[in-house]
Amino acid sequence: TTTSVEASGLLDRMAPAFERQSGMHLRVVAVGTGQALELLRRGDVVAAITHDPEAEKALVERRVAERVEIMKNDFVLVGPESDPAHARGRGIEEVLRAISAGGHPFVSRGDDSGTHRAERRLWKAAGIEPRGPAYREVGQGMAETLAIAGEMAAYTLVDSATFATLRSRVRLAPMVSGDVRLGNTYSVLWRNRRGRRFALWLRSEPARSLMRPRFEPLP
């Protein structure tokens, strides 16, 4: 599973519930989406929860796995309360240009996770190739990235569920949310009957009830 499912606290609720209801043992590996999809491609795992639709569909087209969307939330650009880039209330592309032009610090996960891939797409849409000392790729999970951004009084991108869970621990505030480009859809992919059983459970009402309110279950 992608790390945001773990960092948001959903995994701690979901894993024991699945085991109780299925009688199966769930062995979980929480990594970035890029690594999760690679584990699935190699056959090292039977199912994966990820949030990079383009890469997921590529595996389906190659007949590596089957896929269904299960839930969604949004990405949020967060930053220091002082907001030196004047990000509040502006569109995400405009804000990224302002961060880059002003040399304001930005912390990137830099780990090929779904969040990192989404961030790179947003920079590209803004027409910017982020670089320089103000742009720091840390190669860490979301909780660690938020902590580093808070210490640096920097901006960063985070999914809304993880930020809601960890907000009290970091000195960061939401700056940009609700932009159409910040949608964040999670899917489950599976390779065999065991993986399919888990995927079907994720579409059940008991699983959907666990996703709320940090995630919105998809029909």
Image (tube, rainbow, N blue to C red):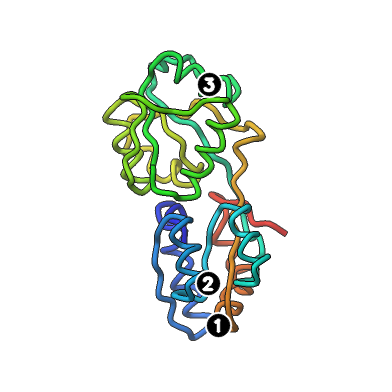
Between residue 170 and residue 186, name the one nearer to us. 186
x and y percentages locating residue 150 in the rendered image: 31, 31
Classify mark 3: residues with Cα within 10 Å, few (<14), some (14-19) or many (20+): many
Residue tagged by mark 2?
A: 47
Q: Residue at x 31, y 40 (%)?
A: 138
The quarter holding residue 198 reads bottom right
Q: Which image quadrant: the C terminus?
A: bottom right
Inspect the image, locate mark 2, and give the three-letter code of the amino acid beneath it. Answer: Ala
Drawn side of residue 89 relative to residue 84, left or right: right
Query: Which badge, 2 or 3, comes first in the chain's sequence?
Result: 2
Answer yes or no: do the residues labelled 1 and 3 have beta carbons within 8 Å? no
Inspect the image, locate mark 1, and give the three-letter code of the amino acid beneath it. Answer: Arg
x and y percentages locating residue 157 in the rendered image: 46, 36
Determine which of the numbered discs, if any, sits on residue 95 in the image. Answer: 3
Question: What secondary structure is marked by label 1?
Answer: helix
**Label 1 to label 2: alpha-carbon separation:** 8 Å
Q: Residue at x 60, y 84 (%)?
A: 193
Residue tagged by mark 1?
A: 194
Query: Which badge, 1 or 3, comes first in the chain's sequence?
Result: 3
Answer yes or no: do the residues labelled 1 and 2 have beta carbons within 8 Å? yes
